[in-house]
Amino acid sequence: MSGKIVKLLISKDPKSAMQSVNQIILEEKKGIFGDRYCAQEGTFSNKGEVEPDRDVTLIEIEKIEAFNQACNQTTRAEDFRRNIVVSNCDLNALVGKEFQIADVILKGIRLCEPCNCLAKELSNEEFLKNMQHKGGLRAEIVKGGSIDLNSQIEV
């Protein structure tokens, strides 16, 4: 399986909007340099304790597009607050598996289910039902490095 990077996103803190960037630097046992979780400032961060399922999150653009079509929405990838938006890659199949993007090695830890915060923000009662098991993947950084928009996902 080979996938494509569509967008790379980071946010400095939980209240800041996600910012699109051309490249990210991933650090083992820390996260993405410049992102809220690397600084342990994320909504679900445990201060002083780095959790591997908070290193990096991914989501499929096809799932976002299907949600928008089914629910007549215009939700952007940034609204989901995931770090890496991919195309042509079944992220659910990567739970418990290692995969590579450029020189970075990631391990899928668990699905990144949609949260009530986004459902409320979208004012969409169908959101949680329509995005269950489609909200992306939480992954651990096994080997750090950099990823840019030209990087490919190799499983």
Image (spheres, grey):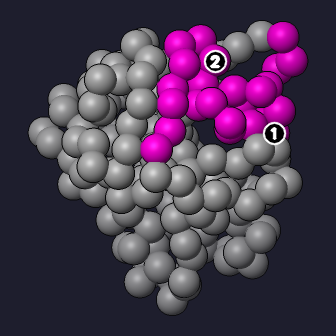
Rendered position, 41 above or below 19: above
Disc 1: which residue:
43
The amino acid type, in three-letter code, at marker 1 is: Thr
Residue stretch in magenta: 23-48
Specify the label residue 79 is tagged with. Answer: none
Residue 99 visible somewhere in the drawing: yes
Judge by depth and name the residue closer to the eye, 83 or 12. Answer: 12
* Image side of residue 38 versus residue 14, left or right: left
Q: Secondary structure at mark 2?
A: loop
Residue 123 placement: quadrant: bottom right
Q: Is residue 107 visible?
A: no
Instruction: Write the residue at 57% across / 76% down.
Output: 75
Coordinates of residue 43 in the picture (x, y in percent):
81, 39
Q: Is residue 30 above or below residue 44?
A: above
Q: Residue at x 19, y 29 (%)?
A: 155
Q: Give the percent coordinates (x, y) of residue 61.
A: 38, 62
Residue at the spot of label 2: 30
Q: Nearer the viewer, residue 6 or 119?
A: 6
Q: Which amino acid does the dot numbered 2 rest on?
A: Lys
**Foreground: 9 or 127?**
9
Query: Residue 17: x and y, percent?
Result: 74, 61
